[in-house]
Image (tube, grey):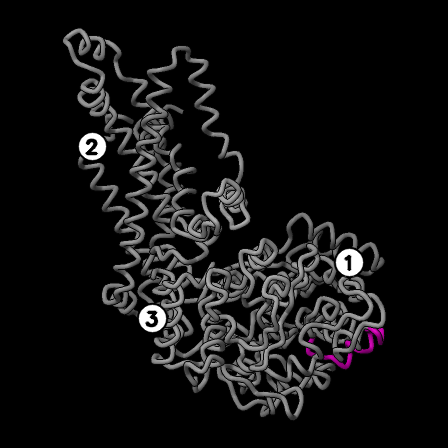
Amino acid sequence: MAGLTAAFNRHSTMLQISPLVITLTLFLVGPVIVIIVLSLWKFDGFMTLSDVWTLRNYERIFTRSLTVSNYLQTGKMLIITLGVTFVLGFTLAYFLVFDLVTLRTKMLLFLLCVVPFWTSAVVRTVAWIPFLGKEGIINKAVMGLGLADQPLQFLLFSEFAVLLSYIQIFTLFMMAPLFNVMARINRDLIEAARDNGANSLQILMNIILPLCKPGIAIGSIFVIALVASDYTAIRILGGSQVGTVAASMANQIYSVQYSPAAATAMILLLVVLLLVGGIMRVVDVRRQL
Amino acid sequence: MSKKTDGKAETGISRRAMLKGTAAVAGLAAGTAIGGFPTIWAQDDITVRTVGMAVSNMPQLEEMANEALPFKVQQTAAQIPDIIARGLNQPEGADLFEPPFMLMRAMWPTGKFQAWDTTKLPMWDNVVGLYKESGKIWEDSWYGDGQNPSQVINTSDQNAKDFVEPGSTKWITNHPVLHNADTLGIRPDIIGRPIDSWKELINPEFAGRAALVSFSQIGLMDAAMAFQANGEREYANKGNMTQDEIDFSVDRLIELKKDGHWRVLWSTFNESVQLMVSGEVVIQSMWSPAVTAVREQGVSCIYQDLKEGYRSWSLGHMMPNHLEGKKRDAVYDYVTWYHSGPAGAFFAKQGYYVVTPDNTQKHLPEAEWDFWFEGKPATVDIYSPFDKLMEKVGAVRDGGSYKNRMGRIAVWNSVMDENEYLTERWNEFMAA
C-alpha cells in the first residue's frame, strides 16, 4: 500500500494530466498526422495512391492564382467579421458590465444572448432565407414602402448574407470573453481616473480598452477559427458563390480528391495557427486564464 | 464502423427470427450464446447491409425486401461523398455499396471490391442493353457523351482492377440498379412562353433567376449543354472535356456570374425545391422527383423536355471484398429480388427506372405502365407509392415516354480525365 501511494505521489502530475493528453493525442494529434500523411499521397486524377509519395499537392497550392483569391476572400470576410463583432461585442459587454447595476439583470441579459445557440447551426443559417429572399420579409417591406421597385438581390445568396450570419452567430464568441475581462476591472481605477479629471472617452481609451486586450485576443481567436472553417453559411446563404478556402476544400472533397483537399487543409491550419500564434505573442492571454 | 448491430437492427433481427420460425431462432440463439463462430455466415441469421443514396434506400423498400426475403436487409441512406468514403475506407462496414456509375473509375481500380458473376444472376438477361455490348437500350438510342455505363461495367476477373470491352466477360464491376435522365426544371407560369432548348439556361432574359447545381462535374456539363445549344462552342465530348474546353466554359460561367446571371448554385434536393417554390429561380437543372415535390406544394413546375436531349445518370451495387459464402449468396438473392419487379414498380411510381423494365411491367397495372413508361395520358389518377395523388386523369408525364428520355441521352454524368483541373477552375468560378 505504502509503495503504491508513493508511486502515485511521484507520478501524480503525470496521472492527472493523462486524460487530457490521451484525449488530445487520440482526437487532435492523431487525425492531424493522418491528414498530413494523406496530403503527401499522390492523386492520379481519380484515386489517391497510398504508396506514392509526392509534394505535388502542395506545389499546386502555391502555383495557382486560385489560392490567392481564396485567401483574399477568406481574409476579407475575417476582417469584416472581426471588426463588426468586436464593436458589437464590446458595446454589449460594456453595457452589461458598467451600465447595469444588479447582477441578476446582468446574468439574465447575458443568458438571452445565448438563446440562438439552442438551435442547430444549420437551422440558424437557414432561418435567414425567409427574411432575405426575393419574396422575403425585408424585400416585401422595402417594396411596400416604395423604396425600390425591384427586389434587392444582394440580400440573399451573397457575401452580404454570409457575413450577416457570421456576425449574428459569432458576436457572442467575442462578447463573452470581453464580458469576462471587463467584469474584473477594478472600479477604483475608473474612480481614480475620474477624480484626476479624465473624461469618459479618456477612461475608455486609456483604461478599459487596454485592460480588455486579453478578452479581445481570446474572442478574435474564436472568430478566426470559426470563419476560416465555415462552409455551411457559404453553401446555404452564399449560394456556393463565395470562394473561400474552406469552400474550395469542400469542392475537392465532393469530387473525391482527398489528398489535394488534405493539403489545402494543412495550409489553412498553418495559416490559422500563425494568426493565433501572432495574437498570443502580442497579448498575454495566459494572464487572463 | 463495422458495428452492424445498433439497437434497431437487433430488434429487427429478433422480430424476423420470430416470424421465420424456430430454425432461425435456434440459429440466432446458438450464434449469440455459444459465440466464437469464425465468420458471420456461419450463423443462419444473415443481415445484408446496404449503403446508398436516399433515393434508393428508404424504409418502405427495406420493408418490402424484408418481407420477400428469408434474411434481414438493413438499408442506410447517405450522401454520395459518404458512400464513397465508407466504401473505400471501411468496406467491411457494409455488404453492398451503391455509388453512381460516374465514380467507377475512382472506386473499382482500388481493388476494394469484387466483381459479380453474371452467370449466377438470374435477372441479368432482363437487364437493358445499356449495360451490355451496345451501351444502348434501343438500337436507335443515343450513346451519349462522357462515360456511358457500359464502358466501366465489365472486368477481366473476379478480383481484377481493370475495365474491359463491354460484354466480353461474365464479370461485372457494378450491378446496375437505377437510371434516369435529368433536364431543366422551369416555372411555366412565370416564364410564360415555350422553352425547348438548353440555351435558355443562359438566356439574359433569366438573369438573376437561373441556377446551376453546385457539384462541379455535373454543373459544368449542364453549362456546356447550354453553350453548345447557344452555338458558342462545339464540344468534342461534353462528358470528357479538354483543358481548353474547360477554360472556355468556366470563363463563360464567370462572365455570366459577373452579369448577375446565376442566382445561386444549389447543393441539395430540398434547396432546389425551395428555390423553385419561392420563385427565387425560374429555370435550373433539376432532378425529376424535385419537380414533383414542387408541384406537390401547388406550384406549377415542368421537367422540360429539350431538343438537345438529357443528361443521364445511373447507380448500381458494388460488392466489397469481404463477402463470401452464404453472405454472398444472400447478396446475390437480394439483387435478384431487386430486379424481379416489385422494387421496379415501387421506383417507377417515383419516376425512376429500375434496369429491368420487363419485370417492372409485370408488377405495374397497365394504366400506370402506360403513364410512366409509354408517355400516354393517364387514364386513372396516378398515385405515388406513398399514396399521394401525383397526377390526375389526362395528365402526360413530362419528357414523355421512357424511350424519349433514356433514348436521347446527350451526356452521361462523368468524372472527366481533367477533373482535378476542372475542380480548380470551378473553385475560381465560385471565387470570382
Where does the magenta region start and end? B354-367
Q: Earlier in the sequence, mark 3 or mark 2?
A: 3
Mark 3 Cα-neighbour bin, 10 Å: few <14, some 14–19, many ≥20: many
Q: Position of residue B56 (x, y in %)?
A: 66, 65
Determine whether B386 is above or below A50 in the image: above
Please name the residue that numbered disc 3 is placed on. A42
Return the chain for callout 1.
B
Q: How many marks?
A: 3
Q: CA distance from mark 3 to mark 2?
A: 41 Å
Whether residue A79 is visible to the viewer of this picture, yes or no, is yes
Return the chain for callout 2.
A
Q: Using the rendered image, report if marks 3 and 1 lie on a common chain.
A: no
| Front residue (pair A147, B41) | A147
In the image, taking residue A18 as reference, residue B376 lies left or right, namely right
Callout 2, which amino acid?
A: Val
| Front residue (pair B346, B223) | B223
When asked about the image quadrant of residue B313, the answer is bottom right
Residue at x 47%, y 24% (from the top left corner) = A111
Mark 1 Cα-neighbour bin, 10 Å: few <14, some 14–19, many ≥20: few
| Front residue (pair B32, A101) | A101
| Front residue (pair B431, A11) | B431
Q: Position of residue A203 (x, y in %)?
A: 20, 17
Return the chain for callout 3.
A
| Label disc, if present, on residue B388 of the rendered structure | 1
Please name the residue that numbered disc 2 is placed on. A283
